Image (cartoon, grey):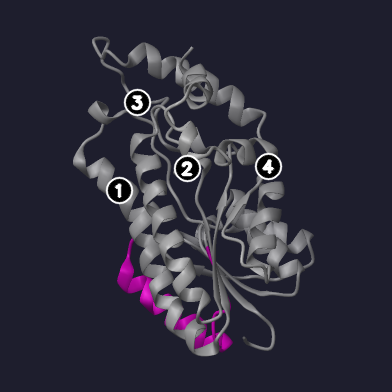
Amino acid sequence: MTSQPVALVTGTSSGIGLWTAVKLAQRGVTVVATMRNPARGDQLRSAATESGVEVDIRALDVTDHDAAAECVAAVQADHGGIDILVNNAGRGSVATLEQLNTEALQEQLDVNYLGVAELTRLVLPGMRRAGSGRVVTVTSVGGVVGQPFADAYCAAKFAVEGLMQSLAPVMARFGVGISVVEPAAVASDFVANTGAEERDTDPNDPYAALLAAYLRRARTSFAAAQHPRDAAETVVEAALSTEPKFRWQTSDSAHAFAGLSLTDLDGARVLVQTNTWLD
């Protein structure tokens, strides 16, 4: 580990990523905060200034693997290594399978799974040689229990959970901790950013009424949800923890959802929780 821990955090222009970057810096960590377009970094800069910390903002599109390799190499050269990786960058999707094409499915995998896998693969050699390090991936309760109209999103989150769960015991032998953080709804523009509410709906679409019901429930849920600043506290705790703990939840509701056992997956408990979003 470097003398002052160095963290690379993705998806920091807003939400959980922004507050994770700020809160890690407040804990004495050197933070490299990445986002696709640094011109959108004003909110992070303001939050960092108000918190009395500095962050190193850099451009990174996690779907561009060549750029990811260049970014990791530059951070390692400039800061002496990477001790913590927080995979936070992600993208939502609101549509059921018949409403999705292959391109939409691939986009979810590119951002939420393959981008995470590639960036993690790039930082592991340095952590392995150092005999220490933490990789924390922000997934979702949707990576544990499927959600209506989140088919592509949940599929990608299930995939990244499986990847990290498989990786964790292997990297533990080299002193590297692997964890996932599973938020439930967080007060953000998550649904709005998917474009679902602006999408023209075919009046003959058999899913139109169900989708409208889902969006009504989603708007209410996200408006009253946990602030991303509070969710980021759990991400920071996971990033700085020395415990061999794999799964972390950011709230009581996330804990209840993610705590469902495999034997519950065919039972009424899951059906009640997910189907109420369609009423």
In the picture of the structure, the residue carrying the numbered disc 2 is: 144
Q: Position of residue 262 (x, y in %)?
A: 46, 39
Q: Which residues are magenta?
A: 63-86
Q: Residues within 10 Å of mark 2 (few under 14, many from 20)?
A: many
**Above/below status of 253 relative to 90:** above
Q: Secondary structure at mark 3?
A: loop
Mark 2 or mark 1, which is nearer the start of the sequence? 1
Q: Secondary structure at mark 4?
A: loop
Q: Nearer the viewer, mark 4 or mark 1?
A: 4
Lateral position of residue 65 relative to residue 119, left or right:
left
Lateral position of residue 263 relative to residue 113, left or right:
right
Q: CA distance from mark 3 to mark 4?
A: 31 Å
Q: Nearer the viewer, mark 2 or mark 3?
A: 2
Q: Secondary structure at mark 1?
A: helix
In the picture of the structure, the residue carrying the numbered disc 3 is: 199
**Residue 36 seen in render:** no
Lateral position of residue 59 relative to residue 29, left or right:
left
Q: Quadrant of residue 67?
A: bottom left
